[in-house]
Amino acid sequence: MTRIAEQLDILEQTPLIEMQGQVLEVRGLACRVGGISVPVGAMVRIETRDPLLGEVVGFDKDEVLVMPFGATGGIKRGDIVTLIQLAQTVPVGDNMLGRVVNALGQPIDEKGPINGVGPRSLYPKVVDPMDRPLIDEPLGTGVRVVDAMTTLGCGQRIGVFAPPGVGKSTILGMMARGTSADVIVVGLVGERGREVQDFVQKQLGKEGLKRAVVVVATGDESPLLRIRAAQAATTVAEFFRDQGKNVLLIMDSLTRFCQAQRQVGLATGEPPATKGFTPSVFSMLPILLERSGRTSKGAITGLYAVLVEGDVDDDPISEAARGVLDGHILLSRALSHRNYWPAVDVLGSISRVADDVINAQHSTAAAQVRRLLAAYKDVEDLLNIGAYADGSNEEFDLAIACKPAIDQLLMQGRSEMPPKGKMDVFTHTSKQLVALSHIIEQNKTKLAQQSQRMRQAQMQRRR
């Protein structure tokens, strides 16, 4: 019944009569159109020499503001503007798996048209919070440092916060290839053109693409298309979620989605607010993020890349996203400079649902590793200058002794994936973490015995 009701709602939004207006003025990214009365969000066609689609983004008295999906060059005063659709939709269907599409849902991978798809609203009704079950199942990603130290739950929303050039796309690609999710939906929003092929062919790979849908809007496209790509990727994920699938939604990046909305906001006359971002950015951000999550039908686990320049706490998008997300994975430039991959700052990362999806043994082992990493960080400067004396601090001694074993678990090559077998990827990593905990206990016992022998030797010398 829900699907039928949705189709009827879309049908109601289809204009029964042709409505037209005329271009009065082009200013910046937007056109002023007169002689037509349509709501914000309606899709129109500007009848230039090469017809151009656009979206109504605002109105002023009797005129509407239309932002084209392409460059405004070639649009002239008096061009006819025709209403196409009152509501925005995107085609969805099972046959989209293995395909790369643009923000309008049109295939761009030269594999021909996609058959068996139907329209679905880009802006569905909000899910009742009481209809969202608790998150109580882990989601394996195939990335050991994530599965062990910042375990994700099915239906969680988490941010991957990273400065440029520290392996953000690489870790997202590793998660896409190694995840235990049924379906992967990737939204490449505002990426450079060459990075699209790189992600699809190298990061995702042929095996990953078989169960994935990739939605693309590059940085040289209209800000409206970049916004729409994020919405379309989420809509496709919702389609598979409603089929009972466990979906992994990867969006790269949330920052460029916000930058696109800032461009639209400024073009429609919004005042710049926090560091140049318009108020609409901070209202649209939680709406997009809240669409991920778990429902009674299925789950969407959202991975949202956030580009960070400078301090994370000083970045308005990072700060706003952290307030909505269920945790964050922080990538470190310092670790990447040491060729430490993935460059995840374990101490700066957190998963707010981890304790709800892991057992007590895993939780204890993760806390133990985290404590030793903190101790090693405290003593690292002394080690680098040769100023630390063995035996000065038991916790420091244990952290130094266990660091190679910890690194062996947390470091992972791009092509290094968990072995395929009866055991799922999360359980495999969890067992490795528990095994590491046993090694730590063995080192602890060994160091205690060494310390005892040293004290006995000192006592004998005094005698």
Image (spheres, rainbow, N blue to C red):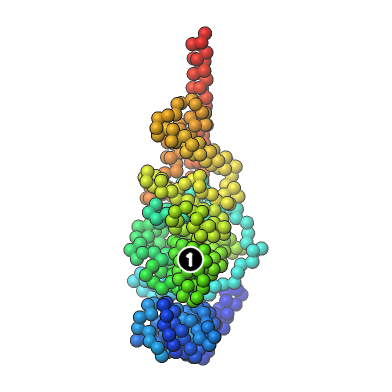
The residue lying at 54 percent from left, 73 percent from top is 123
Query: Looking at the picture, which amino acid does disc 1 mark?
Result: Gly
* Residue at 41% in and 46% down: 334
Rendered residue at 43%/56% (across/down): 309
Relative vertical location of residue 12 with respect to residue 111 in this rendering, above or below: below
Whether 458 is drawn above or below 5: the answer is above
From the top left corner, tell me how far across and down residue 391 is, in percent. 48, 25
Nearest to the observer: residue 179 or residue 225: 225
Give the answer, above or below, for where 271 lies relative to 83.
above
Compared with residue 135, is residue 456 higher up or lower down, i.e. above or below?
Answer: above
Residue 248 makes an appearance in the image = no
* Nearer to the camera, 194 or 285: 285
Horizontal side, residue 173 vs residue 316: left or right: left
SS class of the residue under badge 1? helix
> Residue 170 at x, y = what percent?
39, 54
Q: Which residue is mark 1?
A: 276
